[in-house]
Amino acid sequence: MNGSSKVAIVTGAGTGVGKASALALLRDGWSVVLSGRRPEPLAEVAAMAEPGRALAVPTDITDRQSIAALFAKTRETYGRLDLLFNNAGRGAPAVPIEDLAYEDWKAVVDTNLTGLFLCTQEAFRIMKAQEPMGGRIINNGSISAYAPRPLSIAYTSTKHAVSGLTRSTSLDGRVYDIACGQIDIGNADTAMGGRMKAGVPQADGTVRPEAVFDPEIVGNAVAHMASLPLDANVMFMTVMATKMPFVGRG
């Protein structure tokens, strides 16, 4: 697929995996709409692109109207949408289940699950109506979509739910040539994942440092998934630090 005329939205594009993925797509010739809460990081990423190839749209992923405005601005500027990378996400304080505040639970659900659903709805509306019809949606899952860390019930629950969202989106999108897949990331060296280097709680009660890897590798993986023709799909891809304690017992 030639990315020169293709348009992508990346949520959470100002930092970490979102930034790495946006830059990888730009290198591959995509036009990229950069979505995130804070204007400053988005502007910094946009400045790395050729003129007209990146558009920064500050967005509150927990607000339905803000999401609608993001997709409306994308259609107004570029006329179509070929890729949505549902990347934006957050965690909650690492506390026992009985101590987790309802507000923290709801904030994670609103961001990691409801926000992805609302973005998917808006993407479907554009992708079904455009010519040629179709597009691709990539959801950011997590290693937590398969196995929890201690004290992570809100994050883990939403990431398991993202897998269900991915499967339903993939199934319901077939008739419209909308492909949907998921990338599950383990210990990318970002603001969220980089803390693993200093030591994090393990299932056996110990605290140990874990291996991390460069988020640019995730960006390249997202770009690969995006490069496929719409009659092919990477349904699930796991990209992780080779030496992180995911496979095994502990």
Image (tube, helix red, strand yellow):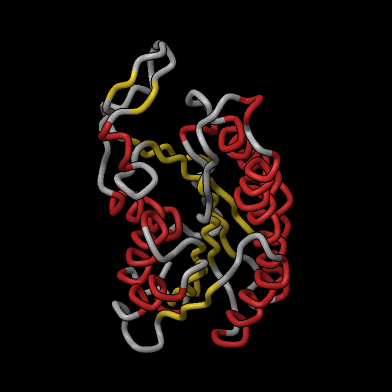
- For the residue pair 3 and 62, the one nearer the viewer reads as 62
Looking at the rendering, which quadrant does residue 197 occupy?
Answer: top left
Q: Quadrant of residue 195?
A: top left
User: Is 206 placed left or right of 150 in the picture?
Assistant: left
Pick whichever, 185 or 155, lies toward us. Answer: 155
Instruction: Residue at 35%, 73% (x, y): give it.
Output: 45
- At 39% from the left and 11% from the top, the residue drawn is 250
Residue 71 coordinates in the image, percent (x, y): 63, 74
Q: Is residue 152 left or right of residue 19?
A: right
Foreground residue, 73 or 96? Answer: 96
Which residue is drawn at the image coordinates 29% and 22% (left, top)? 208
In the rendered view, tell whether residue 107 sits above or below residue 155: below
Q: Residue at x 36, y 42 (%)?
A: 193
The total of numbered circles placed on residues is: 0
Q: Position of residue 39 (x, y in %)?
A: 46, 75
The image shows residue 46, relative to residue 179, as above or below, that is below
**Up-down relation of residue 25 to residue 157 (above or below):** below
- Residue 131: where, in percent of width, then height? 65, 78
- Judge left or right: residue 32 versus residue 113: left
Is residue 98 toward the left or the right of residue 195 in the image?
right
Specify the quadrant that holds the N terminus: bottom left
Q: Position of residue 186 (x, y in %)?
A: 38, 36
215 is higher (above) or lower (below) than 28: above
| Nearer to me, 121 or 88 | 88
